[in-house]
Image (cartoon, helix red, strand yellow):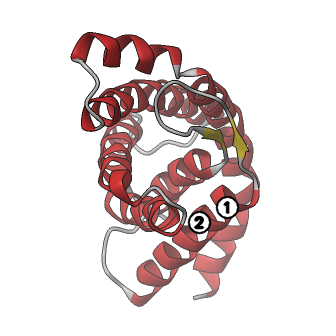
Amino acid sequence: MRQEKNTLRAIIFTGLFAAIIFIGISLLRIPIPALVGRPFIHFGNSLTVLAILFLGGRNGALAGIIGLGGFDLLNGYAATSWLTALEVIVIALVVNTCFNLFQQNDRASHIVILGIVAGLMKIVTTYAVSIVEALMVGTSFKVALINSFLSLPATMINSISTAILVPILYFALRGSLQSVRRRA
């Protein structure tokens, strides 16, 4: 299904994944107390990685930016929505590059590795975003580093769920998406 062209089908699937990501982050949100930001547990990251795997790096990143960024804009996170977009771009680059290194072979072990890589990248990008958020409100750099590190529990849970859910959902959806593609 990995289409990079802007065909009508690719645009429709990009919009569909953006909507699914938005809904996935909106329906299940469990807030976690933190020193920096207002983190919460959600499925938006896992769904974004699936969009990247199914749609390719460019359209998957676009779906993630629209879904996660749209959520941010509509739910009080507008000031940092640009950081969300940067996170999605970095994760899309890493996941897409790793998938291409696997020669787009979707063996179970490759998809599990991609889920783990995506989860680890989410920890790195969220830590960097938390530092920027802390600096945006006037915190000193040293305090921003420490507080951002202490604010990672929600990210750790999201990362673990990404590593677990990506392979499960990928193989559950792969057949359906391939059958839709064959019919068209």
Name the residue that disc number 2 marks: 22
The residue depicted at 68 percent of the width and 74 percent of the height is: 179
Q: Secondary structure at mark 1?
A: helix
The residue depicted at 59 percent of the width and 52 percent of the height is: 44
Q: Nearer the viewer, mark 2 or mark 1?
A: 1
Q: Are marks 2 and 1 in contact (CB under 8 Å)?
A: yes
Q: Secondary structure at mark 2?
A: helix
Compute the Cα span from label 2 to label 1.
Answer: 6 Å
The residue depicted at 64 percent of the width and 42 percent of the height is: 166
Residue 21 picture location, percent across and down:
59, 62
Q: Left or right of 142: which side holds 117? A: right
User: Which quadrant: the C terminus?
Assistant: bottom right
Label 2: few (<14), some (14–19) or many (≥20) C-alpha neighbours in 10 Å: many
User: Nearest the camera: 51 or 69?
Assistant: 69
Name the residue that disc number 1 marks: 26
Residue 120 picture location, percent across and down:
48, 24
- Residue type, mark 2 in image: Phe
Q: Is residue 177 above or below residue 39?
A: below
The residue depicted at 66 percent of the width and 48 percent of the height is: 43
User: Nearest the camera: 3 or 67?
Assistant: 67
Which numbered dot is residue 127?
Answer: none
- Residue type, mark 1 in image: Ser
Q: Is residue 28 above or below residue 106?
A: below
Q: Is residue 107 above or below residue 46?
A: above
